[in-house]
Structure formats: C-alpha cells, structure tokens
Amino acid sequence: MIDTDIIAEALPLLLKGLKVTAFVAAVGIPLGLLVGTLLAYLTLVGNTALKWFARSYIECVRNVPFLIIVYFAYFGLPKMGLMTDAFQVAVLTTGFYTAGYFSELMRAAILSVPKGQMQAAVSLGMGYWRAQRLIIFPQLLGFLIPPTTSLVVMMFKDTAIFSVITLPELTYQSNVVVSESFAYIEILGTTALIYWVSSWFIDFAGNRFNRYALRWKARP
Amino acid sequence: MNTLVTVEVEGISKWYGEAQVLKNCSCTVREQEIVVICGPSGSGKSTLIKTINGLEVVQEGDIRIRNQSILNKGTNLSSLRASVGMVFQHFELFPHLTILQNLTIAQRVVLKRDVTTATKKAKALLEKVGMAVHQDKYPSQLSGGQQQRVAIARSLCMDPFLMLFDEPTSALDPEMVSEVLEVMRDLANEGMTMMVVTHEMGFARNIADRVIFMENGSIVDNTDTASFFGDKSSERAQLFLSKILQH
Amino acid sequence: MEQVLTPFMNGVLHAVQATVLISSAACLLGIVLGILLLLARTSPVLALRYLAIVYVSAMRGTPLLIQLLVVYYAIPGMLNITITPVFAGVVALAMNTAAYISEILRGVLSSLPSGQRGAAFSLGMTRWQSWRHIILPQIFLRALPPLTNEFTVTFKASSLLSIISVSELSSLARNVTLQTNAPLMVFSVCAAVYFIMLFLLSSASRRIERQVQVRVGRHD
C-alpha cells in the first residue's frame, strides 16, 4: 500500500528542504537567544523607558500568532522600502519570535538563583561580573536549559510556516512533491518523520547538555 | 497507674527491599501514658510511629490498638485511623482548603457530622489552640508554628483516644517550637494518650512517662523517664544524650 | 485608510467568532483526549503506556502544519472520505493540544506532596474519599494556570487553519490584503485584534495563577 519508490524519489528533495530548514533555525534561533538575553536584562535593570520597550516587545510576541508576524514581515516590510527575500524574513522572524520567549525564560532563571549566592560571592571578594560568570551563570543553566530546549524544538517546528512565503524549506518541498504525485501518505509521513527525528535529536542534545551542566548536582 | 493497654506492638520487622528498617520491635503504651521515642536520624523512629496507624506496613509481627489487630484483614483501618490522631513533621494541612475547612472536612466525610456540629467542634478546638482568628485563612498564609497548631486541632476534631506525633517541631523555626509544645503539654495534662517522636529532650524530661530509645531499627531502651535521664539507660543512649544536650 | 479597512472591519466580527469557537472546541476536545492519554500513560498495560509515549512524542516532535495537512489530506484520502476544513482543523488542533495537556496533568500529579495522602488516610478517609476531597481538587487547582496557558497557545495556533482555507481571523487578513494591497495596515490591525483577545486571556490566566498560589502554596 505504501509506495516506497515515491519516497525514495522524493527523498533528495526533502533533504534539500531540511538543509534550508536547519539553516534558518541555526541562524535565527541563536540570534533570538542573543536578543532575548539582552531583553531579559533590560526588564531587570533597564530604566523605565527601556523596561517598557522590552515588556511591549515580549507581550507582542506572546500575544500575536507567528503566522501574522511572518505575513507582516514578508508582505509589509517591502512596502516600507525594505527589500527582503523569503530567506531574510525567515531568519529575522525566527530570531524575533525566539527572543520574546527566551527573554522570559532567562528572566525567570536569573531570578531563581538565590540572592545569597551573589552576596556570598561578593563577600569573598569577587567583582560583580566575575560573580555573574563563575557563580550565578552555572547555577542558572539548570533552570534555563530544559525550557530552552523546548523553545528550540518549538521554533524549529514553526519554521514549517515559511512554506507559505515560498521559502524552499522542508514543508514547502514536501508540498511540491505532493502536488505532483498526490502521494499524501508517503510524502507527508516521510516529512513528519524527518521533523520528528530532528526534534528528537534536539531534545537529546539538550538533555545531554543539561546533564553536563548540572554534573555538580546530587542525583537521587 | 492505668493498666488498660492502648497500643501493643509485638515483634514487628520491616524491610525496604534489602534494608531492614525495623528489627523485631516490641513495646506497649497504656491508657493516658505519654511515651517519647527518640534516637539518631535513620534509627527507624518515624517508621515505627507510622506503623501504628498503618501508614507503613510491616512484614512481621503484630500491632494491636485497644486489642484490635491493625494487620487483621477484617479490621476497618479507616475507622480505626479516624480515632487515632496523627501529627506530621510537615503539618500536611490541605492547602486548597481554609483553616476551618481543614478541620471540618474529615468530620463531615468520615464521621458524617452535619456542618453545624462540625463547625462548632472546629471552632472550639481552634479556640483551644489559639488559632480562632485565622479560621478563614489558607494554610500558606500561616507560619509553621501556627500551621502545626492547626494540624493538632484537626486531629483532635475526630475525638481520638490516642495521638501520634511524628517530629512535630523539627520543621519549625526555633522561636515557634514552644507554642506547639505548649499545646502538646496541655493535651498531656488533660490525660490524652500520646506517642511522640521528638528531639526535644526538655519536653521528654518534663512530660513523658516513658522514653523509648531507638538505634538502627531496634529499640535499645524502653524505660521510665527518670531512669532514662538518670544513669540507668544504655551507653548508646547516654552517648546520644550527651551529643544532643551539648548545645 | 478607511477604504482599506472597510472590508476587514466588515468581516472581523464573524472571523473573531470563528477563531474563538474553533479554539474553544479544540480545547475541550483536547482536554478529553488529554485525560484519556494520561490514563493510558499511567495504565498498568505496557502497550498502552508505550502507545501514549509515542503519541505524545510524535505530536511534540512534528509541526502542527504537517499534522494539519495529514488530518485534512492524507487520512481522508486513505479512508476514501472527505471532511470539511473546519472539522479537520479542530481535530488536528485537539490532537496536538491533547499531547501537551496530558503532560501538564502528569506533571501536576507527580508534584503533589506525598504526605497529603497519608494525612487524609490518618484522618480515617478511605482511598476514594481522599481522592475526591484532597487529591483531585489540588490537581485541578494546580493544573488550571498551565491549562489556561496551553489554551492561549492553541488560540494562537488556530491561525494556521487559514492555510487549509478555514475562514477565520488570519484568513480574513490574508484575503483583505490581496484585495487592497495594504499589508502593513491590515496585518497590524489583525495583530492588534489577536493581541487584545490573547492579552485579556493571559491576564485572566495570571489572575487565576495568583489566586491558586494562595490556595496551593507550598508550606515548606
């Protein structure tokens, strides 16, 4: 019933799509983590205006569907005189959206390290930034890595949306093959499997990293 | 001395997998007697007291409460527990219920008392432990000492003939210990039968009739209070006391 | 500007209604499915447990868009039936959210302090009474905030249904853009409409969370 020939034939194109998907994720998500960290610090230590800016950014991401933001960027930005192609839109919106969510995770993580840790470090004679790096950051990872792994998986999956702005990523290529062969089960199934394996891999890597970062914690 | 036996523990043993946590323990508690159980951490004293109302199951031996074996399949464990009060180290108030509701819920669903009766009883006991003004708060809004006093009142609502205390003050800040001990002292003076796992040696010395000392799952000493704090107790117990009383 | 927005404003009430109805229906169905999944996940039957684990992993590992296409195209094609886009959309959303809901409930179940059951027992409650009066109310209270949050996620995700031509808020915006060629204006207004609804929803969710915190706050 399952036509394996169709799958074999489509596989190179799908994998080519996966490359684009992976590339968008690999550039866009780290960009988002960077901007998100910045936003988190703005909400914690910025002046009123900066705090307000960061809050509105975060609320905007939390309360507007990704699809609408992608549409806005893809169809709207050129009207503002910014010439962008699908690839640039994909990377930028991925980064934009990731940043909003990540800043919330970062903020919560920063706040969950007990205040006494910083005080202890400073009273041992460490400077603020050295204490941040050597004492706070390693403890922060334990709160940060698990939810960040989920966020990365979420954003990786959300790149499927870029098929609607004709970015030749995995879902787009899958649609191309389906529209020619009408082999819905085979092609959509294979595509889903590719996403699934990739997500599983991200999860696995995140868990491994978490275990490494938390090796100092007693395990029951 | 009252000769009626309330609790009879006969040669109980318990294992967690390979590890034996109770080794052939026996003891009796008479009506109106106050028994303190002490010993180093991990000695099995908490496990012992939890076996009395069947929260922990033993593999060997027998436990009888007012001549009724709790290990007997015919025994209605729930109704037995309803008349044996238990106070926990971490209070275990029900966080989703107000203080008053914490005191009335078991009266209503277990004893089938009507709301008015249950509420009246609850209010009287809250008054007794000095918590009446907090009746509409939630447990998370109270201090540890206050929560523990409420927990004691909750048990008393069931009109128990025996009260079990599992380290009732060890999760409390030092300044809150005395308010809980005071409630327990009043209870003792009223003639309640009590088994108390505690490190509060002052309480043991002043209130207890008898002290049981445990180590490594065995009962090492089981003697009247004066002898225990005199020099009649075992070397192990003397060592334990010297460590605990040093500071 | 008025001319541009007229077609959007004409359809917006109807579109909002569709979006609200679709996501609510998906959520209710998702809760039912989620509870079934939880039962399977905690069942003594090994096969059922594995089935639940694989289902949850698959739903969390693949994009909603792909799931949507599978439910709308592949499965009806295989069974030789046709279903409406709305039906497919609601089912796909529900199947997706159910996976997350079952995990939320599982987490809440395992986070209940174990002493609670002991306390209920020692007051003489039977197993059933302790579930009915002590355990279940706490599960419900603790699950409420994450469930409301999951609802906002589903609400946002319902925008993807525009891709299989369900008429709701996002598809309205897309269609009006094609008519008027004013993407900046239309998508901004559309984003604002989403924002208002989701902001109200998450404010409500935050208020619930604060109230719940008082009632299930940890006592240690």
Image (cartoon, coloured by chain):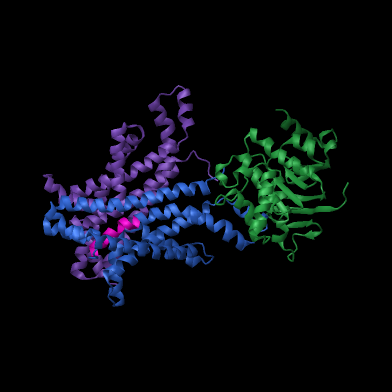
For this rendering, which residue is in front, A133 or C162? C162
The single residue placed furthest to the bottom in the displayed view is C80
Chain (purple): A
Q: Is residue B138 left or right of residue A115?
A: right
The color chain C is rendered in: blue
Res B16 seen here: no
Query: Magenta segment, principal secondary structure?
Result: helix
What percent of the width, then of the height, locates residue A84? Answer: 14, 47
Q: In this picture, which residue range is highlighted in magenta? A: C153-164
For residue C29, what is the image quadrant?
A: bottom left
- Residue C155 magenta-highlighted: yes
For this rendering, which residue is in front, A183 or B131? B131
| Residue at the image position 64 percent from the left and 45 percent from the top | B150
| Residue at the image position 73 percent from the left and 53 percent from the top | B159
Question: Does residue A52 sit above or below C1 in this rendering?
Answer: above
For residue A4, what is the image quadrant?
A: bottom left
| Residue at the image position 67 percent from the left and 39 percent from the top | B169
What percent of the width, then of the height, locates residue B237? Answer: 78, 36
Q: Is residue B219 left or right of residue A144?
A: right
The color chain B is rendered in: green
